[in-house]
Image (spheres, rainbow, N blue to C red):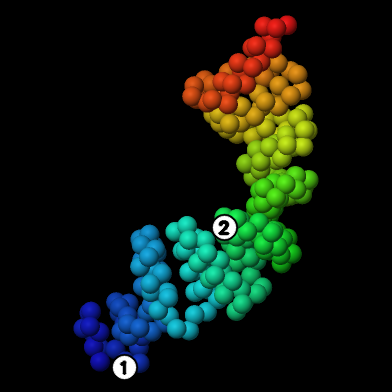
Amino acid sequence: MKCPNCGREIQDDFIFCPHCGTPIKENTKEALIRKAWRHRAKSKLRDAISYCERIEDKDADNLRNLGEMYYLLGEMDKAIEYFEKSLNLNPDLPDTYYDLGIALYRAGRLKEAVEKLEYCIKLNEDFVMAHYWLGIVYYHRGNLQKSIDNYLKLIKKNPSSRVANYHLGLALMAQGRYKDAIFYFNELLEVDDEDTALYYHLGSAYFHIYDLTNAIKYLKKALEINPEDERSKRLLMRIMDIMDVK
């Protein structure tokens, strides 16, 4: 038989033309996967999904790929569905538990998110970014100490994950540990000195330990970067009122 694209002779049982790569049998699993990846590479996720979903014999990788694309589209319920189907076929992949945990968090299913992320780490303790998401999930569940513990584990294993310092600082402030929070906020300040929220929280932390000079310094810096930052304006005015009273 001849390839319909390049016209060169190929064997009848070939799935792809060995000369130009054109799929010969359009509805085979291999052809559908190739079409899906081509569309995904062009960010045409809906088209890519349509090809993946036409595959009758879906394997764990194909199902996880569907979960990833639905996640990117913001359709968390569908993402969760496919991540779970993938794990039913291959229950030993920490990557899929990680993706599922984040999708569950995004869907507001915090208890389940914790379970999946912790199991991800159980399967592979070097999967350190799972600690970052556990910190966030535990914070929103109100378990501040577990949130703090996970951020500290992440920072210990990978000090370059500086954004963890910000969320760790917020958790420490929620516990009333303002001096500790200042330390970690300053660690992040060495990397990013243009973050309005970071300056606001530094100002707030200093305010709570009655260091009004530094509180004013950082709140003014926040307003230099973003003059419309209402939080910094209100707290700065409050401090000025206190100082006027004195």
Quarter the C terminus occupies: top right
Q: Could you tell which of marks 2 and 1 lies nearer the N-terminus?
A: 1
Classify mark 2: helix, strand or loop.
Answer: loop
- Note whether residue 132 is visible: no
Query: Crowding near pointer 1: few (<14 within 10 Å), some, many (20+)?
Result: few
Residues 181 and 104: in front is 104
Q: Is residue 186 left or right of residue 38?
A: right
Q: Position of residue 14 (x, y in %)?
A: 35, 88
Quarter the N terminus occupies: bottom left
Residues 159 and 179: in front is 179
Q: Which residue is mark 1?
A: 12
Query: Crowding near pointer 2: few (<14 within 10 Å), some, many (20+)?
Result: some
Q: Which residue is mark 2?
A: 107
Q: Position of residue 154 (x, y in %)?
A: 71, 49
On residue 75, the disc is none
The image shows a total of numbered marks equal to 2
Residue located at (75% from left, 44% from top): 144
Quadrant of residue 239 within the rendered picture: top right
Residue located at (69% from left, 44% from top): 159
